[in-house]
Each structure stands twice: as C-alpha cells, then as structure tokens.
Amino acid sequence: MKSRKTIRIKAVAQTGAIIVIACLLAVCTNILRDSGLPLVGDWSADSRFADNSGQSLVIGLTEASRMHAENKAVFVDARPESQYNQGHIKGALCLPWQEADRRFMEVAGRLEGGKTIICYCDGENCELSHELALFLEDMGFEDVRVLVNGWTKWRRAGLPTQKEDRENG
C-alpha cells in the first residue's frame, strides 16, 4: 500500500505534466492558426496610437509646443466639454470624441488651412485622442497627430493654457 506522501507527490507531478502539455498545445495551436495572437507585442505609445496603415500618429511635447508657438498646428481637445471648460491648451478647439459625429461641422472650417491637427486628451492610456485622430483622418484630413497624455504633459511643462469663461464662452 502506497503512503499518502507518495500519492501526493505523484498527483502534483501529474498535475504539473498536464499543465505543461496544455500550454504546449495552446502555443502550437496559436502558431498554426492564421489568426493567432502575437506571443510578443509592442505596447509602446507609437504602436498603440497608429493609423490604419500602421503609421505612428504620436507627436512629442517639444515638437507640439514649437508648432503651437509658431501657429503651425490646430489643437483639438478630445475630452468631454466639462473637462475642456475647466482648462485646455490655449486656443484648442473642443471636439469631444463622444460627440464627434454630431459636433464635427461646428469645428470643420477651423481645421482647414493646411495646419497639422494635434488631438489630445489626458492620461497615458486615454484613447479619446487616438479615436478622434482616426475619425479626422476618415473625414479627409491628412496631417493628424496625437499628443499622448497631452493635457497633463502640457500643464506640467508650464505651457500656455486657458479656461472657458462661462459668461463669454
């Protein structure tokens, strides 16, 4: 008769073997599938914030602030209007992503003119600016960029901001 200790050791070994075999089968199946998931991915901002062709839309703070100072870009705030009213990049247009379809015509004329369009929101993982940039590209604008975590970076750098005056805004 086998001892309980021997049975436990054998059970743990068999469980480990089953897990290893299951993982190997899963990896092999994933590799052989046409639509397999990548085992290693690029999760950088450049790859996450890309257009449909895979081209990065990311613009750095230095370049964005230079373009702002030289009036070579139009900044578009993708955050909800309530956040825009609390503070935004000076001169930025308010086009909340959730309302882009409905409010696009309000700002469309101000996006013309060959300037770079720089969309921003707030937070490293905020997707609003990326979604808005893709929307604007779909609407025919060619030079659209994303300033990742734009609002926070802009404020921390002490760059020009403004708040909406509710009486005059």
Image (tube, helix red, strand yellow):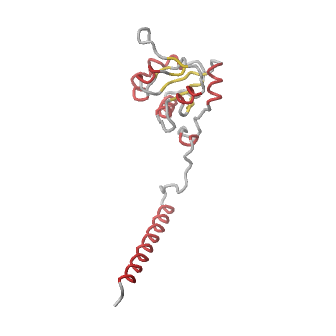
Q: Residue furthest top?
A: 168
Position above or below: 77 against 24: above
Residue 124 location (% of width, % of height): 52, 37
- Which quarter of the image is occupied by the N terminus? bottom left
Using the image as rendered, state which of residue 127 and residue 157 is in the foreground: 157
Q: Residue furthest left?
A: 1
Residue 149 location (% of width, % of height): 53, 33
Residue 146 location (% of width, % of height): 55, 32
The number of callouts visible is 0
Position above or below: 145 against 109: below
- Which residue is at 51% across, 24% downward? 76
- Which residue is at 58% across, 19% downward? 160
- Which quarter of the image is occupied by the C terminus? top left
Position above or below: 81 against 147: above
Residue 83 location (% of width, % of height): 43, 24
Using the image as rendered, state which of residue 104 and residue 39 is in the foreground: 39
Q: Is 130 positioned to the left or the right of 60 in the image?
A: left
Position above or below: 166 against 156: above
